[in-house]
Image (cartoon, rainbow, N blue to C red):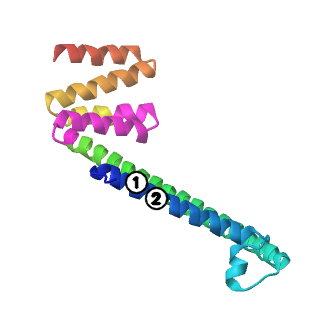
């Protein structure tokens, strides 16, 4: 009987090949383990099952130690990698933060009033004595700055007088702000 279907022919061939492979695997396994002698002993010409078991134990221990060392090395490498990445990210964020501060300062420097406000803010940090700060601000008013800067100085002066419980002086400065 002749089969005219090519798919059926291919499937039949594949099935026969699979059966041959499985039969071969089964025979190798049975022959190698028939007398309790591993296939490696037969191939190497050794027939001492006790020695083979001891060798297998040493090989397994060495393999386990090697795997543990590789695992530890891998974990260490991964930790180092992520630590390096985190450090780089931190440095980048720090640099970006500095650049943002510089950008903001440059923006402030373009405006005279904003620059004066920044200087007054920094002066707060430097001058601790309220009387000295009032003296410095009065001196700045005497230099006849531009009107927006003069108003800024007066606002800061009024604030200092209020903090120092000098209500009369604060009232005078606020009145000058209103007049101007």
- Provide residue 64's location: percent of width, then percent of height: 70, 66
The crowd level at tag 2 (other Cα within 10 Å; few <14, some 14-19, many 20+) is few
- Provide residue 123's location: percent of width, then percent of height: 36, 39
Q: Nearer the viewer, residue 167 or 118?
A: 118
Magenta segment main secondary structure = helix
Residue that protrudes farthest toward the bottom in the picture:
45
Q: Nearer the viewer, residue 135 or 12?
A: 12
Q: Which mark is residue 16?
A: 2
Q: Please state if 172 lies on the left or on the right of 66 as rendered.
A: left
> Which element is circle 2 on?
helix
The crowd level at tag 1 (other Cα within 10 Å; few <14, some 14-19, many 20+) is few
- Between the residue at mark 2 and the residue at mark 1, the CA separation in whole angstroms equals 6 Å
Q: Visible in this render: residue 95?
A: no
Determine the residue positioned at 27% across, 47% down. 102
Q: Which mark is residue 12?
A: 1
Q: Quadrant of residue 88?
A: bottom left
- Give the quadrant of the C terminus: top left
Q: Visible in this render: residue 176?
A: yes
Magenta stretch holds residue 133:
yes
Determine the residue positioned at 29% across, 39% down. 119
Q: Nearer the viewer, residue 163 or 166?
A: 163
**Label pair 2/1, CB-CB below 8 angstroms:** yes
Residue that protrudes farthest toward the front in the picture:
1
Residue that protrudes farthest toward the right in the picture:
50
Magenta stretch holds residue 59:
no
Start-end of magenta stretch? 107-135
Q: Is residue 101 above or below residue 152?
A: below
Q: Nearer the viewer, residue 68 or 176?
A: 68
Determine the residue positioned at 22% across, 25% down. 151
Q: Quadrant of residue 37?
A: bottom right
- Provide residue 91's location: percent of width, then percent of height: 40, 54
């Amino acid at each position: 009987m002749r089969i005219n279907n090519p798919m059926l022919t291919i499937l039949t061939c594949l099935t026969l090949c699979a059966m041959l492979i499985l039969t071969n695997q089964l025979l190798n396994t049975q022959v190698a383990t028939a007398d309790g002698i591993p296939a490696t002993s037969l191939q190497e010409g050794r027939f001492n099952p006790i020695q083979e078991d001891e060798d297998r134990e040493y090989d397994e221990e060495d393999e386990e130690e090697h795997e543990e060392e590789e695992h530890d090395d891998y974990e260490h490498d991964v930790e180092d990698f992520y630590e390096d990445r985190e450090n780089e990210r931190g440095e980048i964020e720090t640099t970006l933060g500095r650049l943002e501060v510089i950008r903001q300062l440059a923006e402030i420097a373009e405006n005279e009033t904003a620059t004066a406000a920044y200087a007054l803010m920094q002066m707060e940090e430097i001058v601790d004595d309220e009387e000295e700060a009032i003296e410095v601000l009065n001196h700045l008013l005497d230099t006849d700055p531009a009107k927006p800067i003069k108003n800024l100085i007066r606002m800061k002066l009024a604030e200092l007088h209020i903090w120092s419980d000098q209500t009369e002086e604060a009232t005078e400065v606020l009145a000058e702000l209103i007049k101007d």
